Image (tube, rainbow, N blue to C red):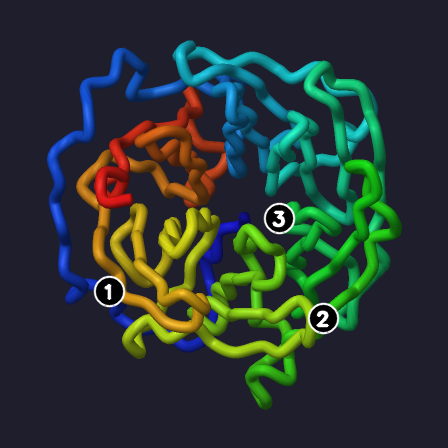
Amino acid sequence: MRVRLRTSCLVAAVLAAFPVTVAPPVSAHALPDTYVVSDAPGVLPEGIAVDRDGTMYVSSDGTGTLYQGHVRDPRMRVFRAQEGQHRPSTLGVHVDRRGRVFSVGGAVLTVHDRYGNLLAERTAAPGPLGAPDLNDLVITDDAVYVTDWANPVVLRAPLRNGRPGRLEPWLDMRPAFPGFPAQYWLLNGIVADRSGRTVLVSSNGTEAVWRIDTTTRAVSQVDLGGQSFGADGMVLAGQTLYAVLNYGAPHGVYIAKLDSELRAGTVTNRITAEPFDLPTTLARHGCRLYVVNSQLDDPPGRPPYTVSAVDDPSCQRR
């Protein structure tokens, strides 16, 4: 997920009027509130994934390095991954059901096992506007879908036994918003429902979340009350959408309850009072949300680079 710092796109004073629901903590946690990704200069953490066993992975926009840790341990370490670490920037990172680590950066998608062994590396071809800048990804049962920050295109790689095939352009987003400048789509976070039949993609430029039917490739805007919603990273749990906003709205986590078809919803919670440092994305584990403090608004930032953990205010309602 890449932060939009400057754009000439549509901008609104967003979400300030959304209702805020403050819920008490679900339970007392004997877990850290802050995780140190690295003390090394220039790391600029960006993406995050937390496996079912609590293993945490964080990517670096500044160096391309992946870091590994655990929700019980306040300090992370370099993930000793074979190959795939020559790229200067790593953004989206996700873990599949077998603990394999998928990550993207530049033009490259890589897959490692939990021990750092390289399983696959796929390179995307240039898009309609030029060189790709792969931003985020989501893993379904039969494919990996990837957003491209530099091109208004969603890419797809079929999966067989957890290994991706060719990474190819799958959907050009431009027809969904005719006349909108192609270079300002700025595709960012991407999530899918459990069936893999519906994908949601956030676009910083259009300041909206877009719904894609993976069978028909039909695209429509998710109706969030007519408000601007240019999310960065996102998480989808059932009908609950968690999104990090860092442009045009108070920085933080916004939680929306969507309808059964993921076509419309209402923002029910905002977590903006926490001391986030330009948050880019988040992961969810148990009843906690793990939010990356990127410092990308002031590169190379100032060590230590951290992840903040906050209670999920909607957890007890599911």
Q: Residue furthest bottom?
A: 179
Q: Which residue sits at x=51%, y=19%?
A: 53
The residue at the point 76 percent across, 33 percent down is 111
Q: Secondary structure at mark 2?
A: strand
Residue type, numbered disc 2? Leu
Residue 85 percent across, percent down from the top left: 75, 28
Structural distance between the alpha carbons of marks 3 and 1: 26 Å
Q: Left or right: 310 with respect to 216?
A: left
Residue on which the image places disc 2: 171
Picture disc at residue 15: 1
Q: Earlier in the sequence, mark 2 or mark 3?
A: 3
Choose the circle earlier in sequence order: 3 or 1. 1
| Kind of residue at disc 3 | Val
Q: CA distance from mark 1 to mark 2?
A: 29 Å
Using the image, determine if residue 299 lies above or below residue 14: above
Q: Measuring from the top left, give residue 300's x and y in whole percent.
A: 50, 33
Q: Which amino acid, mark 1?
A: Leu
